[in-house]
Amino acid sequence: MRAFIRLSILALLGLTSGAVFVAKGALHIWRKERPDDAQATAIARTDNTLWRTVQAKRDEEPSRQSEPRP
């Protein structure tokens, strides 16, 4: 019975640490490479579309135009 309890605790700790590891990997972007323009242009050309580089920025201060909901 003690062996079963010890193995259960060990399995629970292993599953918890594995879940934390997977969640941390899902929340962080590890590779921050720029896309290859030549490859993107080739893909866009085959689909008869356009390729444009876009950069998103956020405001330093949040907009105060909308009031928070109660």
Image (cartoon, rainbow, N blue to C red):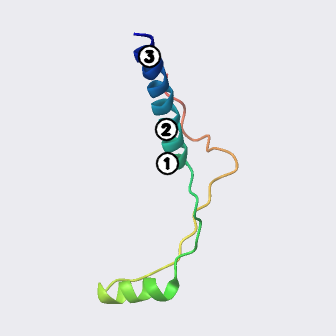
Q: Residues within 10 Å of mark 3 (few under 14, many from 20)?
A: few
Q: Is residue 28 above or below residue 42?
A: above
Is 8 in front, or is 61?
Answer: 8
Residue 49: image quadrant is bottom left
- Label 2 and label 3: CA atoms lie apart by 22 Å
Of labels 3 and 1, earlier in sequence is 3
Q: SS of the residue at dot 2?
A: helix
The disc label shown at residue 26, or none: 1
Of labels 2 and 1, earlier in sequence is 2
Q: Are marks 2 and 1 in contact (CB under 8 Å)?
A: no
Q: Residue at x 37, y 84 (%)?
A: 44
Of labels 2 and 3, earlier in sequence is 3
Q: SS of the residue at dot 1?
A: helix
Nearest to the eye among marks 2 and 3: give it: 3
Q: Residues within 10 Å of mark 1 (few under 14, many from 20)?
A: few
The disc label shown at residue 18, or none: 2
The disc label shown at residue 3, or none: 3
Q: Is residue 60 above or below residue 50?
A: above
Residue 68 in the image: state x and y as whole percent.
Answer: 53, 30
Q: Residue at x 45, y 86 (%)?
A: 39
Looking at the image, the residue that sits furthest to the right is 60
